[in-house]
Image (cartoon, rainbow, N blue to C red):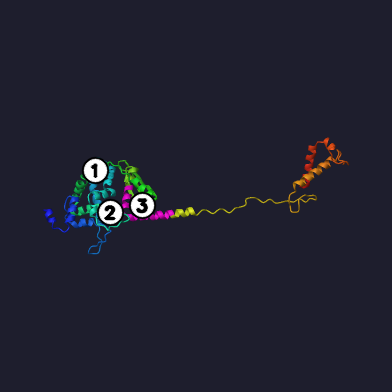
Amino acid sequence: MDRIKLLFRKDRELYLSLYEILGFYPNNIEYYKTAMLHSSVAKKNQKGKPINNERLEFLGDAVLNAVVGHIVYDHFPGKREGFLTNTRSKLVQRDMLNKLAKEMGIARLIISHGQNLSHNSYIEGNAFEALVGAIYLDKGYKACMKFVKKRILDEVVNLDKVAYKVVNFKSRLIEWCQKNRVTIEFRLLKQERDANGNPFFKYQVFIEDIEGGIAMGFSKKESQQQAAKLTLEMLRKHPQLIDEIMAIKSDRTKMEENLLMSLPEEDAQEDFFIEKKKHHKASKATNIDKDNSLPTQETIASKVNKAVAEKSNTNDKGIATRHTLDEDDVANQERESIIAAAEEEAFKDLN
C-alpha cells in the first residue's frame, strides 16, 4: 500500500533511498530533507532564517550517544563503566560515522555547495547524526534504537570486534600536534577516591594553552584517553578552534625567533691592570738615555770589561799597578770570581 502511495508523491526518489537506508518510510519527509542539507548551501525559510542540518546534528548526537550506550549496556553485562564508555566512544567517533555514512549510502544524499571547504572531513558524520535526529523527531526513540541495532550493528558493524579493538586517542592527538608543531599538555585537575575507595583521576587537555577536553577515569590512562578523544571531537566539530590554535602558535614562534635574534651586546673591554709608576733615581753616572730607554747589551758588556780590567790592575792591598791586563797576570787569579765581582760593580753603576 505504501509503495502505491509513493508513486504519486513528489519526493518518491528520496523516499525510496531513505527506505533502503532506514528500513522504513518516513512520516515527515521535511525532517530528512533538512538532515541532508549542509550549512554551505545558503537556504532560508519564509522568515529569512537559514535552514541546514546543524540543529538536527546537535539533537542526533545526544540521541545517538544514548541509544549506543543503551545497546552497549545490554550487550556487555557486568562490564565496568570504563569499558562501556570506550566501546560507545569507538562507535560514535567521527571516523566511524563517516564510514557508516558512506557504506550505507547516506553520503550521496547530502546537499552541499560542492566546493572543498577547509575542514570538510566530518560532513558525512554530521549528516549521519542529523539523520538520527530526524528519525527521533519523526518516529521516536524506539525507532532510533531499531535503526542502530538492525541496520548498523546487525548488518554493517561487528560490535564485539569494535569493543575489543584498542583505539589510542591520546597517541592520535599527540601525533596531530607533532605534525602541526603545536604544544600539548595533559594536566591533572583532580585525584580523589570515590565512596568505595576506588581512585579516580580528572584530566584536561591543553593545546597551546587552549582548553581541550576534560574527562574522568579510574586510571590516569583511561582519563587521558577520554580527554584526548573529546579534544579530537572538538577539533573536528569546531574548525575555528584549530584556527585559534594556529594563530597562537604563530605568535609564539615569532616571539621565539625574536629572542634568538636579539643577542646580548658584548661587554666593553676594561683594563683590570694597575699602571706602575716609574721612579727615577738621580745619579751622576747613568747609562739611561734622556728618552728613558734602557741601556744596551753593548753598554753592559763594556762596563763588565772595564771592571775586570780595574780589578786585575789592583793588588791585594788595593794599590794599582802600572802594567796592563795580560794573560800571564790573569793566569794566577780566579778569573770567574773576578768576572762575577766585575758584573756586580757594573750593575751597581747602572742602577
Q: Nearer the viewer, residue 180 or 133?
A: 180
SS at badge 1: helix
Residue neighbourhood size for the residue with mark 3, other residues' Cα within 10 Å, grouped as few (<14), some (14–19), many (≥20): few
The mark that comes first in sequence, 3 or 1, is 1
Amino acid type, residue under disc 3 in the picture: Glu
Q: CA distance from mark 3 to mark 1?
A: 33 Å
- The image shows residue 299 at horizontal and vertical percentages of 77, 47
Q: Which residue is mark 2?
A: 123
Q: Looking at the rendering, which quadrant does residue 309 occupy?
A: top right
Please tell me whether the stretch drawn in magenta is mainly helix, strand or loop. helix
- Which of the labelled discs sits on residue 211, or is there none? 3
| Depth order, front residue of 134/75 | 134
Label 1, residues with CA under 10 Å away: few <14, some 14-19, many ≥20 = some
Inter-mark Cα distance, 3 to 2: 24 Å
Residue drawn at (13%, 53%), measured in percent from left and top? 3
Q: Residue furthest right?
A: 322
Give the extent of the magenta segment.
228-253
Mark 2 belongs to which amino acid? Answer: Ile
Which residue is denoted by mark 1 in the rendering? 159
Q: Position of residue 93 (x, y in %)?
A: 28, 48
Query: Are circles 3 and 2 on residues that touch, CB within 8 Å?
Result: no
Q: Which mark is residue 344?
A: none
Secondary element at image label 3? strand
